[in-house]
Amino acid sequence: MKISHLIWSLKVGGSETMLIDIVNEQAVGNEVTLILGNDVADGTVLERLNSNVDVRFIGRAPGSWNPWYALKLFHTLRRLSPDVIHVHQESFIRITSFLEAPTVLTVHDTRTRLSPHASKCATIYCISEAVRLGLLPQQPHSRMMVIHNGVPCSTILQKTRYGQHPFRIVQVSRLYHEIKGQDVLLHALQHVNKTLGQGSATVDFIGEGESREFLFKLAQKLKVDNWCTFLGTQSRATIYKNLQAYDLLVQPSRHEGFGLTVVEAMAARVPVLVSNIEGPMEIIGAGRHGYYFRAGDHLDCAAKIIDVVKQSQRDTFPDGLDRTAEYVRNQFDIAATAKKYLAEYKNIIGETHAA
């Protein structure tokens, strides 16, 4: 099967990470091309691509309205003659709808607003049920289905020791507190250390973003800067190696369509604490496989952290994490995600030829 994936830019982020993992899996036994519309690509992300993935660069400057790039993309796709075109931003549909191959779209965010052009897709894939429910009123006549994001579980080292002091917390995401809620976690850290004793808990923030300076100053203002560290962007290989050194991953997002880092921590047998919004709650099975707190409520977040600290001292604590890791392998392994997409492509191609 010949598959072309389209994305405008390749930065460090959850949807980009998922895309790289999927094309690598699909490239085993299929002809896979990854087309980047803009001249924006993070080298650490690109280097994770398997050598048998064909990468094409259109070279458009972000935001450019120059029609030459649209024509270049159109002619690139015509020469490739894919069996299916998988787009990861809706704006590509205006171009791909003029081609014979069926177009499918993956939507990654609960806040996405689709235009009428999306109805031209053979299928709209949603990374969570929360995303699907958000899109349903906009596209009541479109074919939609949920295919969860996945992670390469076998490459993530697993945690074996619990109950350490200080209690180490990690938060992995873009530093954008208005969406990702890192400010909530800093306020919670202040309360945890006031309750359990100064230095009882620490937080490492992994990622970069526009809120870095704001969060750094907030940590100083709250006088928790001695117990939190901003580690910047790290490779997936480094994260997969080091997750097991932490005692808890906290994802305090105010908006989140899924939450790939939550799945990664669960695969590493690290407990997770998420805000009670749709995407992350879907991942943890509404509390069966993780902890949750009221979104935006730092006191509730702190209370749940303190609860996990106490529970982690029990000998039976790892038992639940074994079950969680097995659940992740069954539900969210990237190999299963890639196979689901391939099976869907075959159905769509068959329907297209039959028509």
Image (spheres, grey):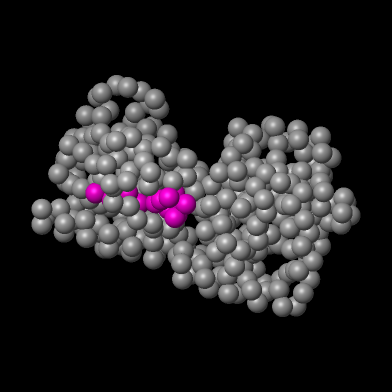
Q: Is residue 88 magenta?
A: no
**Residue at the image position 47 percent from the left and 45 percent from the top:** 110
Spot the residue most to the left. Answer: 354
Q: Is residue 129 magenta?
A: yes
**Residue at the image position 47 percent from the left and 52 percent from the top:** 130
Determine whether, in the image, residue 159 is placed left or right of residue 33.
right
Determine whether, in the image, residue 332 is placed left or right of residue 250.
left
Instruction: Locate the N terminus and report the quarter of the image it occupies.
Output: bottom left
Q: Which of 277 and 244 is in front in this view?
A: 277
Determine whether, in the image, residue 197 is placed left or right of residue 187.
right
**Residue at the image position 61 percent from the left and 53 percent from the top:** 276
**Residue at the image position 74 percent from the left and 57 percent from the top:** 305
Determine whether, in the image, residue 320 is placed left or right of residue 197.
left
Tell me, yes or no, if residue 275 can be seen here.
yes
Give the quarter of the image for residue 38.
Answer: top left
Region in magenta: 122-133
Give the quarter of the image for residue 182.
Answer: top right
Q: Nearer the viewer, residue 312 or 20?
A: 312
Percent position (x, y) of residue 11? 47, 40
Give the quarter of the image for residue 239.
Answer: bottom right
Percent position (x, y) of residue 60? 34, 28
Q: Which of 85 and 252 is in front in this view?
A: 252
